[in-house]
Image (cartoon, rainbow, N blue to C red):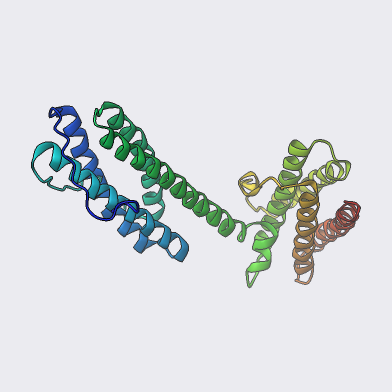
Amino acid sequence: MYSNHSGPQYYDYRMPNDIQLVNDIKKAINAEYSAVACYKKLANMTTSVDERNRILEIQKDEVRHLEEFSRIYTNLTGNKPSYQVIEKCPDKYKAGIEFAFKDEQEAVDFYLDIADKANDPIIKERFRRAAADEQNHAVWFLSFSKNLRQTNINRQINNYGAKGALSVSTLTLPQMLTFALQDEYLAQARYDNILGNFGYIRTFAQIKEAELRHINALLPLFERYQVPLPEDKSQSFVTTPESIKAAYADGVQGEIDNISMYERFLSLNIPNDIRTVFSQLRNASLNHLSAFERGLARI
């Protein structure tokens, strides 16, 4: 069962039957039995081949724990354990991954507690090894959860700001104003983040001030054309660049997207006052693009 054993192991513990220890091991058996069933369910839910394979590997560990704990229980009590699902596995993948992460963390503490209570060195060793496995599992489930959040963010940002404006097949006037303001919000949030993490950088500080002027130029159009102001969700889409060079590269790409958005708007039949504002913002973004490109070339 373990790679360092050639076959099934049978232990003659010849120790007093500690009722609390036996009850804890019985609980651990049912927890492992529940995990085996849950992880099979989660593996069938995910669309990621890598995640499915990893979950099935984790499930193999849980099967190994189940067999080992059952063998310990039988040697302590003289009886084979019965098996019962004691934890309901969620029906949604995201909830299931979060449930599994929490469950694995709790298992670490529980198994270490069992190891501390046990007098037999083999029981101690088996539950400490299982605790280490569960800690490793928790790390994997946490990474799956982060992947889901990032995927959700990426999906949302594709419908936000310039990326949203460039992805839709048709555009209404309210949509154009909304996408434009969202993108200006996003640019200012991005530069706030860079200045907060890397300190004062003149290019980013100046362009951040310009983005505020862009926002102020757009706001009267919402009132004039009776378009509801969009909620500012830009902070949820901002991540910290790995370096100042990456920050400049992000700035270049952000301005390219921004310019492309305004170019598309200007190709459509729009009121002259909106055309004037969009033209001004497009031209300002061209200047920002040049500034970021110069900064990137200097690094």
Classify 227 as above or below 22.
below
**Image quarter in which the N terminus is found:** bottom left
Marker count (numbered): 0
Residue 38 x %, y %: 29, 53
Quarter of the rendering containing residue 13: top left
Which of these two is toward me, 292 or 1?
Answer: 1
146 sits to left or right of 24: right
Question: Can residue 204 be seen?
Answer: yes
Residue beneath the point at 36% across and 59% down: 56
Residue 12 x %, y %: 15, 39
Residue beneath the point at 64% across and 71% down: 170
294 sits to left or right of 184: right
Classify 111 as above or below 39.
above
Residue 294 x %, y %: 91, 55
Residue beneath the point at 8% across and 40% down: 78
Question: Can residue 48 be seen?
Answer: no
Classify 281 as above or below 98.
below
Outermost residue on the front side: it is 6
Residue 65 x %, y %: 28, 47
Which of these two is toward me, 39 or 1?
Answer: 1
Outermost residue on the left side: it is 78
96 sits to left or right of 296: left
Quarter of the rendering containing residue 43: bottom left
